[in-house]
Image (cartoon, rainbow, N blue to C red):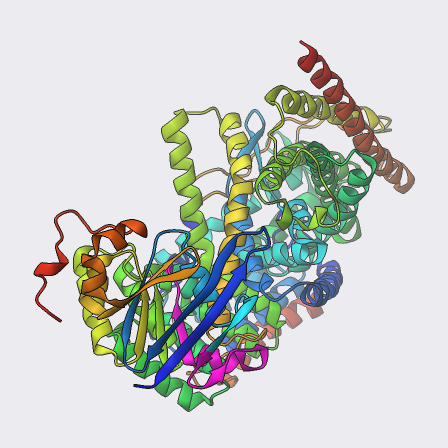
Amino acid sequence: MSGVHAHALHYHGHSPVHRLAPEVKIVAMFAFVAAVIATPTRAVWAFGFLAAVLAVAVGLAEIPMGFFLKRLSIEIPFVIFALAMPFVGQGPYVEVGSLSLSVPGLWGSWNVLAKATLSVGASIVLSATTEVADILSGFDRLRAPRLLTAIAGFMVRYLEVVVSELGRVRTAIAARLGDLSRRREAATLAAVSGTMFIRAYERGERIHQAMLARGYQGVMPAAAAPELPVRWSGMVAWAASAWVVAAAAILTT
Amino acid sequence: MTALLEVEDLAYTYPDGTEALRGATFSVAEGERVALLGPNGAGKTTLLLALIGIIQASRGVVRVGGVTLEPETYPEVRRRIGIVFQDPDDQLFMPTVWRDVAFGPANLGLDGEEVETRTKEALAAVDMEQQADRAPHHLSGGEARRAAIATVLSMRPDVLVLDEPTSNLDPVGRRELADLLSTLDTTQIVVTHDLPFALRLCPRSIVLNGGRVAADGPTAELLSDTDLMAANRLELPYGFDPGTIAGR
Amino acid sequence: MHVPDGFIDAATSVGTGVVAAGGLGVSLRKAARALRDFHVPLAGVTAALIFALQMLNFPVLPGVSGHLMGGALAAILLGPWMGAAVVSVVVIVQALFFADGGVSALGVNVTNIALVTAFVAWPVFRVVLKILPKTRLSAMAAAMASAFVSVLAGSFAFVLEYALGGVGGAPIGTVLGAMTGIHALIGIGEGLITATALGTVLAVRPDLVQGVADVELSGTDTVPTGRAVTTFVLTGLVVAIALVLFVAPFASPHPDGLETVAEETGFASAAQEHPIGGPLADYQVAGVESETVGTIVSGIIGTVIAFAIGLGVVAVSRRRARSA
């Protein structure tokens, strides 16, 4: 369950990007992704420029390429099915070797691979330069629904607690029942999920008691003012460059 | 000495009919350190919850610093009586230690500077200033325990109540905790099974059993009274003789 | 089931984004109003639990695995509004931090995985529970049915979105067939897990389950006999599979028995399970709206009937076991 550890998402540093207020980086990410999505599929050249824009951000954030590429490789499983499109799409077809591939399918594959990669890259820059807690504060200051960020905050906080509890249960099952077939293990885990929910409920109750004891009255206290100065100009310029590329692509296609 | 905390005839019955508290009465003076002892099921945790209105007693009065506990005064009472619950994982629910410690003062409606001052002060009191930006699940048991105490100290309570603070601590951790608590000059109530810890830290002990106060007196005396101990399912660790501890 | 960027065009992404934002907004407001505020930490810890459970794969076919989605379970336990909100948080965090689902596809993923599943599972659960005798086993049957239907509903929502703005030019019939086939199987797994998990909760703390909050269930303090549960589950399984395969119309002007790599179904850790393709039942579907609606409706009705039958079989076998 290695995907869980939030500290693996974050790359500690003091780059100019690290020192940007989180809400600026969140908006930057969404603005960049929007530009990527808006870029027409067939303007292949444009994606090269967008990749360059992203690379600028990666460079400014002083994220090592090895780290960045490793995080990027996580995306691969999720786009693998994009490779099916040339085989499933309708005509016109093109002969590639002995295969007859659908042309819209090929463009579809390209679309997914290019856009997903760029978009994941942008989210990596965000999560590598901003602690999860700060990202949630950023959303708070961007006026995301308070209940949503509160739930997300608790979820992130207790994720490792729950995952290690689940891990301990699986160990206990293995210790008692030996190597189970996947089906038996799945069935046992299903029953265990119920127990885990009860524990989650009781923990939720205890947390609430601790919150009440410290004066909680139904509303989470407002996110503290950012420790980092909120400077939008640099980000706006960067996002604008992505949009210039997208606009050029749209106009010339 | 004036009574800071007064509990009179506190009673509570759970929805399933269990009478957890049956008229507990005691008072604690300012500056005292009192241990709350008793077997499992004696009603100790129920008492703590009732003390600040998390559950509503069916009978009885709680008064702290002259303020009587009732729904309108919950916020004030909860500021004056600070409870550190047993599991630090339940107490530390924010993403960083700093935010957890700041949670209490923030809820009191204090302004940003004041919140920061109190947070720093509380962290310093438990020697956790260096760990302020760490995530709670990265703390060791002892660190988590200290951080949990800081989350309550930042509210500047008049009475600090700790529920089983030595659970999951190794012997050195226990001693360090006792040392820490003895440096804090807040009035303290320590719910504990750890009788040597109680003897070390608290001159006075209250024994709770069956929802009522069964005994109330100097800790060394209570622990030496073998009949009393047996009657309340209290037992000293093997080989421990309270009489040999130098007089407190 | 987590759609990446670039799969659905910009216009549809924006459209579903609006739908998702609206649906989530409504859910949050209703959840906040209906529940005591201690449900904030509960929702968070439950979200963590669902996230963790989603990392566990179960075998669906040789070489194919699925994972729990959790919308039905969240809805039955926490109510539809809080359930939808909780799974939404999981989906959003997965997209933003774990590259599971595209940032631009948030509208699609939140809608399909959190909103559609929770809002379909809840009424199906309640309706089935109303029809059946008020026992714990009935609640488990209702949970299985509602989880199964909710997964299918989520996949139908995806097909609709793909029809509106999908890229790659895959014929809708093929997409519908592939998605329905795989999700029918995932739905069975989700149904089993949801039913079993609910059974455990009902055995220990039935008061925690919103879905049965106003219902007195009998049999909650006893464990149903292993045979009864197995019989019920197997019956339900067999009938459900048979109905799904049987009901799908198989007339098509262009039969094209292709094996397709359908979609990712697992994401344990980067190193482990990968999206797995596999051979599917050759699914010929004439991609005409009325046929599709007919398929959906008969699928749902069929599932409900399946469980009524299943329950009847269980009742009979229990009587026989007792008199044996």
Quadrant in which the N terminus of chain A appears: top left
User: In the rendered view, does C231 fall on the left or right side of A22?
Assistant: right
Which of the 4 quarters of the picture holds residue C39? bottom right
Residue B204 in the image: above or below residue C223: below
Q: Nearer the viewer, residue C127 or B158?
A: B158
User: In the rendered view, does A16 fall on the left or right side of A103?
Assistant: left
User: In the rendered view, does B170 fall on the left or right side of C307?
Assistant: left
* x then y, percent, for residue A109: 62, 47
Which of the 4 quarters of the picture holds residue C231? top right
Residue C96 in the image: above or below residue C159: below
**How many numbered discs, if any?**
0
The magenta-colored residue range is B63-87
Point out the residue furthest to the front here: B227
The residue sitting at 64% across, 65% down in the picture is C36
Q: Nearer the viewer, residue C189 or B33?
A: B33
Q: Is residue A97 visible?
A: yes
Point out the residue furthest to the top here: C324
* x then y, percent, for residue A181: 48, 24
Q: Nearer the viewer, residue A26 or B220?
A: B220
Residue B7 in magenta?
Answer: no
Which of the 4 quarters of the picture holds residue B171? bottom left
Residue B85 in magenta?
Answer: yes
* x then y, percent, for residue C41: 54, 62
Quadrant in which the C terminus of chain A appears: bottom right
* x then y, percent, for residue B234: 28, 52
The residue sitting at 42% across, 74% down in the picture is B99
The residue sitting at 71% across, 62% down in the picture is C27
Q: Nearer the viewer, residue C163 or B85?
A: B85
Q: Is residue C99 visible?
A: no
